[in-house]
Image (tube, helix red, strand yellow):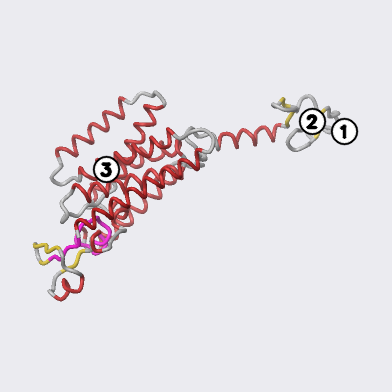
Amino acid sequence: MVACYRHPGVAAGVGCQRCGRPLCGQCMIEAPVGHQCTECVARGLAETRQASLPYGGRRSADPARTSLVLIAINALVWLGGFLTGGTRSPLFTALSLSPRSLCVAGNSYYPGFDAAACSAAGATYLPGVTGGAWWQLLTNAFVHVDLMHIGFNMLALWFLGPSLERVLGRTRFLALYFLSALCGSVFVLFLSDPLSQTAGASGAIFGLLGALLVVVVRSRGDARNLLMWLGLNVMITIFGASWISWQGHLGGFVGGVIVALVLVALRGRGRERLQLGALGAFGVVLIVAAVIRALLLT
């Protein structure tokens, strides 16, 4: 007699279709083909849940972890800048977004100088995108002016980030975050004063708002609270346009909407490859646009 693997004194009637272990009548669970044991059914459900996110990707074990890491990086960069001079810190200057390189003497800005000529004149050289500081297109999203600036942005990231990662998975969430930040930077290059400096994660945050709006509308959820929050942020941006980068906010929002539309539209078999290709193409378009704008400014 072949005994059940869970009940040694009971004869087994069938074997598990997945692992082959003998099963008695109490332990066998009907499957699409044959029967399975409880462990294999539980494992199958776990695998199905992990890969069953509505727009592809795998479910994050801890959806808040990515946002916490981003918050920690922002906090460390702000602390480093604060301890070395605030907005006059070399760290702030190197990481914030400056479309054109500047030569600063006192309160005067002189565009067009290279680093050597600026230093020879006894002035301070501020690198910009036109001077080869391409990293600023992304690093500006990790630099903040003061404690209130970083506080509001990180609070918004904490509320929005985990919710989106639960729906999109970690990889797609990170793609959304960085592509939104990059899109915001490109809008700044085209629409802002070339002699300005832009800093803050607001572009990426507005991208999260745009993506969440797309997801809520797509799932036919109640978007009223989200629209109220978005409207409040738009009003703050409008009334603070003299010191808030509405260009970065608008660009981030557009970027987030585009990324979310790509993830929502490309579904079915092979969607991972299609989504990756579409998001990669979007990133290339943004980089090409930034290069063209930098050449025009030069």
292 lies above or below 60: below
89, 121: nearer the viewer: 121
Q: Residue furthest bottom?
A: 120
User: Horizontal placement of 159 versus 112: left or right?
Assistant: right
User: Horizontal placement of 235 versus 141: left or right?
Assistant: left
- Span shown in magenta: 88-104
User: For residue 96: magenta?
Assistant: yes
Distance between the Cα atoms at labels 3 and 2?
A: 60 Å
Please tell me the numbered disc located at residue 251.
3
Please tell me the numbered disc located at residue 23.
2
Q: Quadrant of the N terminus?
A: top right
Query: Which amino acid does the dot numbered 3 rest on?
Result: Gly
Q: Secondary structure at mark 3?
A: helix
Task: State the image coordinates of residue 106 (x, y, percent, origin top left).
Answer: 9, 65
Q: Check contact, mark 1 vs mark 2: CB within 8 A.
A: no
Task: State the image coordinates of residue 248 (x, y, percent, origin top left).
Answer: 24, 45
Distance between the Cα atoms at labels 1 and 3?
A: 67 Å
Query: Which amino acid does the dot numbered 2 rest on?
Result: Leu
Query: Which amino acid does the dot numbered 1 rest on?
Result: Val
Q: Residue at x 18, y 45 (%)?
A: 244
Look at mark 1 in the image and give the residue it sits on.
2
Q: Residue at x 44, y 42 (%)?
A: 172
User: Horizontal placement of 125 versus 208: left or right?
Assistant: left
